[in-house]
Amino acid sequence: MSERAVRLTQAGGPDVMQVQTVEVGDPGPGEIRIRQKAAGLNFIDIYQRSGVYDIPMPSGLGLEGAGVVEAVGEGVTHLRVGDRVAYASQPIGAYATARVMPARCVVRLPDGLSFAQGAAMMLKGLTVQYLLRKTLPPGGLQAGDAIVFHAAAGGVGLIACQWAKALGLRLIATAGSDAKCELALAHGAAVAINYQRENFADRVKEITGGEGVKVVYDSVGASTFEGSLACLRPFGLMVSFGNASGKVPPVPITALATKGLYLTRPSIFHHLSSREATQAMADDLFQVVSSGQVKISVEQRYALEDVQRAHREMESRSTTGAGVLMLD
Ligand code: NDP
């Protein structure tokens, strides 16, 4: 079967991504073939395309998608031909009109959700799931606790604003413009700081009456790391889960000493280690979405052929919320 897919032979700028005709075969044992309807655009795709994260070349791109099961390999029992499905998973290769992949990474998409929503919510929503539900300071988080969440108007960020509110947390958002701050507030953030204009660590101290917060969720990396540590109260948890502004330089352990801080650098893929774990996290996500507590809106839609523009817009910080490639 001839299909269209984004391929790259080397790391580099957006122009290394080319849409090519590829052959997609039948699924082997434990695999399925998906007729893809939409693929999620994620900042991790930029790290992989640009060489911030090394990937074997030549390669496809994309880790999130939604579509219809078209063929099922031997031994697959939880999915059938015709099922509407979604996933957030390796192997790389979601920017494609069809693909074969391990069935254990794939879950059924609830009926009320469109393919675009499915492709917009899995990697980002499951990330928020493991961050707010499992990546917690000693003693956990209680309703009323303040947390800092950087880049809160982005794809992961807008889901985090809503989910934190549903959990009763006071999410202090940071974002790169006043308009983005407004968006974070409209999605449930308690306070929003434009960190291009203001020193966010000073503002967080002010907002918390000098106490600081129990957790900072930091996906911005190099430009925010130090300020994030300053936002924490004694025994607080620093969650460094991305590097949109560049990799965090090596951190001396003594940087944690003044307040007895905890530091973790998690990845979603450790959490999606089995079919059961993936399904349990997805069920939690689908529950907050079906209850209306978290709304999944798709802010940017592109054709597969516009993938270079999609990456340029994401990298230049001109996007908000989630973006998808529409594959029909
Ligand atoms: P976003 O839509 O949030 O886009 C990234 C945002 O980072 C930008 O919109 C921008 O928001 C902010 N940013 C700050 N500094 C820069 C900079 N110098 N260049 C570009 N952007 C900058 O992306 P995603 O929702 O896809 O992902 C959010 C983050 O979460 C990413 O860092 C990603 O790698 C990470 N992530 C980590 C996972 C994990 O398990 N470890 C899993 C999934 C995502 P603003 O203008 O408001 O500053």
Image: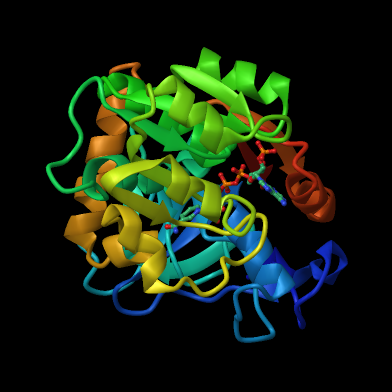
Q: Residue furthest right?
A: 15
| Viewer-side residue, 278 vs 74 | 278
Q: Quadrant of residue 297?
A: top right
Q: Can see residue 136?
A: yes
Q: Is residue 10 above or below residue 133?
A: below
Q: How many marks?
A: 0
Left or right placement of residue 243 versus residue 234 in this view: right
Left or right placement of residue 139 versus residue 113 in this view: left
Q: Is residue 285 above or below residue 75?
A: above
Q: Can see residue 116?
A: no
Residue occupying the point 43% across, 69% down: 101
| Viewer-side residue, 189 vs 8 | 189
Q: Quadrant of residue 172?
A: top left
Q: Quadrant of residue 142?
A: top left
Residue occupying the point 50% across, 40% down: 156
**Residue 292, how many percent across, how many down?**
35, 16
Q: Quadrant of the C terminus?
A: top right
Q: Quadrant of the N terminus?
A: bottom right
**Residue 290, how many percent across, how many down?**
31, 22
| Viewer-side residue, 193 vs 63 | 193
| Viewer-side residue, 23 vs 132 | 132
**Residue 83, how many percent across, how many down?**
36, 45
Residue occupying the point 23% across, 42% down: 133
Residue occupying the point 70% across, 65% down: 5
Q: Is residue 139 above or below residue 110?
A: below
Left or right placement of residue 66 versus residue 200 in this view: left
**Residue 22, how many percent across, how many down?**
70, 74
Q: How is the image coloured?
A: rainbow
Q: Is residue 293 above or below residue 328?
A: above
